Image (spheres, coloured by chain):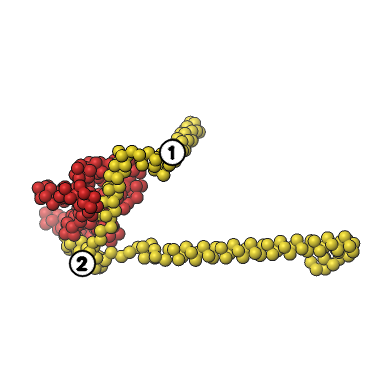
Chain colours: A yellow, B red
Amino acid sequence: MDEKGDGISMLAAIKENRCKRLRNWLWKLLAERFSIEQQWVQDHIANCPKCRGRIARLGRVDAALALLKAEPHSIDLLMRANTQAIGVLKHSLRETAKACKLRRARPESTILERYGKYKRPLFHAAACVAVAVLLKISTFSSAGKFRAGSQKAVEHYYASRAGEDIAGEVFRSHA
Amino acid sequence: MAGRVVSIELVWDFPIPKALEQTQGWVLVAMQHHGRELVNMLWRILGNEQDVCDAYQDTFLSLAHHEYGSKPENVKGYVFRSASNRAISILRHRYLEKRDLSSKLIDKRKAATPAGELDSKYLKESLRAGIARLPDHLRDVVTLHDLGELPYEQVGRMLGITSATARVYRCKAVQLLAAWMRKETA
């Protein structure tokens, strides 16, 4: 009975996976075919006043949202808000060390924001290191290949001129 | 009888207040963890510092009194939704109060010109008015995702919907806002 149940749940999972794959594939196809970057979509927009207007209106909403996000508030707003909120909490909470700390809280930037300005130089440095490592690896490996190839050529030369046993002796002693 | 009174007093004096004290510490922890993001979201919704402080205070007061001081299952979801709802009710109240005044403040003739359309103050105010008018399910997604900067997955979890549904709601909300902002300028 359990095995039968397991089999049914496995079939359902496979079916679900297939559906998910199909859904993802459809989304990808639609996104590729009808994305705004497509030339035919851009041509249509350029010649259709209705679509142009619609896109401009959506753009205005996006612009307004960006303006709301970009508007800064005063630096002590968090401190004031915390102080006001803590003031209405019960006495035992108001007197804790954490509450005192929160009353003095200022918006601190996150690690990502703080070190964001170093992102580009860090990427550049990492890329340089990667290129240097790759160059070194490729230089050493090509030098090794070149050495092995030339040794083989010289061995072959000696073998053809002086005989296999002498060449073997010379190169074995070198090895 | 006297013995019974004493025992009841002991019950009230000793374990309950201590337990409550301990459990209420999470209110401050929540304030520490989500305060910055909450203030940012409230500021974007309201654009007025005193209103931000009021909505913030109400949010944490309601958190502290949630079901007799018990901790909600999803504290972040609770504070964000609660703050967003409070901010929207303040915004609606403000627009109701200033209905006549705002129509005078927003000069439609000025807005119809290209310079007026790009006037940042006008754009922000008309967007805020639009957000206050949106149906609840669409408004929640816009405030939490766009103004609270929460990812769709988190917004979905907070609202009890899938992230795909949250995306659809956001798309519908933007279309509605675009239509309303167009009517205002027309």
Q: Quadrant of the N terminus of chain B?
A: bottom left
Q: Earlier in the sequence, mark 1 or mark 2?
A: 1
Q: Helix, strand, or loop for circle 1?
A: helix
Q: Residue at x 21, y 51 (%)?
A: B116
Q: Residues within 10 Å of mark 2 (few under 14, many from 20)?
A: few
Q: Nearer the viewer, residue A54 or A7?
A: A54
Q: Tell me the chain of label 2.
A: A
Mark 2 residue type: Glu
Q: Indicate the secondary structure of the residue bearing disc 2.
A: loop
Q: Is residue A61 in sight in this rendering?
A: yes
Residue at point 61%, 65% (across, down): A136
Q: Quadrant of residue B50?
A: bottom left
Q: Position of residue A17 (x, y in %)?
A: 47, 37
Who is closer to the viewer here, A90 or A32? A32
Rendered view: B167 above or below A137: above
Q: Which residue is mark 1?
A: A33
What amino acid is found at the position of numbered circle 1 in the picture? Arg
| Residue positioned most to the front | A47
Q: Chain of mark 1?
A: A
Q: Is residue A16 above or below residue B129?
A: above
Question: Residue A154, position in %: x, y?
Answer: 81, 64
Q: How many marks?
A: 2
Q: What residue is at 63 percent from the left and 62 percent from the top? A: A138
Q: Where on the picture, by quarter, is residue A111?
A: bottom left
Q: Is B29 situated left or right of A171 in this image?
A: left
Q: Is residue B7 visible in this depiction of the protein?
A: no
Q: Position of residue A122 (x, y in %)?
A: 46, 65
Left or right? Give the position of A170 relative to B182. right
In front of the other: A47 or A164? A47
Nearer the camera: disc 1 or disc 2: 1
Q: Which mark is residue A95?
A: 2
